[in-house]
Amino acid sequence: MSTSSDDGGCSNRSAGGTNQEKTYKGVRCRRWGKWVSEIRVPGSQERLWLGTYSTPEGAAVAHDAASYCLRGNTCLHKLNFPSMLPPTARTDLSPRSIQKVASDAGMAIDARFIASRETTKSNETLNISVDDYL
């Protein structure tokens, strides 16, 4: 699955410019390294903007929440992370409420991934011994 890199890029690209990583459904990357998500409303041309995220996982969970709210149980097999649907995701919400549920879910996942990344970085700096410098 996709992961963001430390240099702000979205993926590793080969010399031919093709994407070498698998991406999440409903997620794309901006040139400057942020991940965005939007979804089409069934039966219309309308799109719901779900937000901009620091991690592809946050954008994917936002898309999952909105997809469930719009389509119900019929979409469960197509979700990126079906086990991570927020309890606030319901099928009777207005488009504005769907955006709020999706954004909240995506931001929570973003925060969790960023915190775990920072914890990993701080643990790496603590595991340096004096012998590494000799």
Image: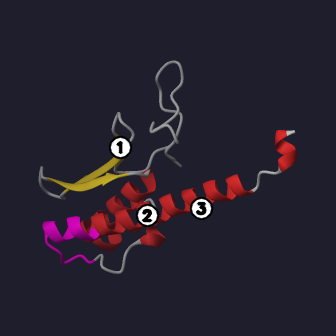
The residue wearing badge 2 is 111
Q: Position of residue 133 (x, y in %)?
A: 82, 40
Q: Give me the residue at 33% from left, 61% from top.
A: 62
131 sits left or right of 11 in the view: right
In primary-sequence order, the first of circles 1 and 2 is 1
Q: Which residues are magenta?
A: 90-101
Horizontal side of residue 104 vs 58, given as left or right: left
Residue corresponding to mark 1: 28
* Distance Cα–Cα, label 1 vs label 3: 26 Å
Q: Residues within 10 Å of mark 3 (few under 14, many from 20)?
A: few
At which x and y percent is residue 94?
Answer: 13, 71
Residue situated in front as seen by the camera: 25 or 105: 105
Q: Residue at x 15, y 66 (%)?
A: 95
The type of residue carrying mark 3 is: Thr
Q: Could you tell me residue 34's position as x and y percent?
A: 36, 44
Q: Amino acid at mark 2?
A: Ala
Q: Which residue is mark 3?
A: 119
Asked if one can make out residue 75 in the rendered structure from this viewpoint, the answer is: no
Image quadrant holding the C terminus, namely top right
> Quarter of the image holding residue 77?
bottom left
Q: Secondary structure at mark 1?
A: strand
Q: Is residue 112 visible?
A: yes
Secondary structure, mark 2, is: helix
Q: Amino acid at mark 1?
A: Arg
Real-space CA distance between mark 2 and mark 3, rounded to the nearest whole angstrom: 12 Å
Q: Point out the residue furthest to the top here.
A: 16
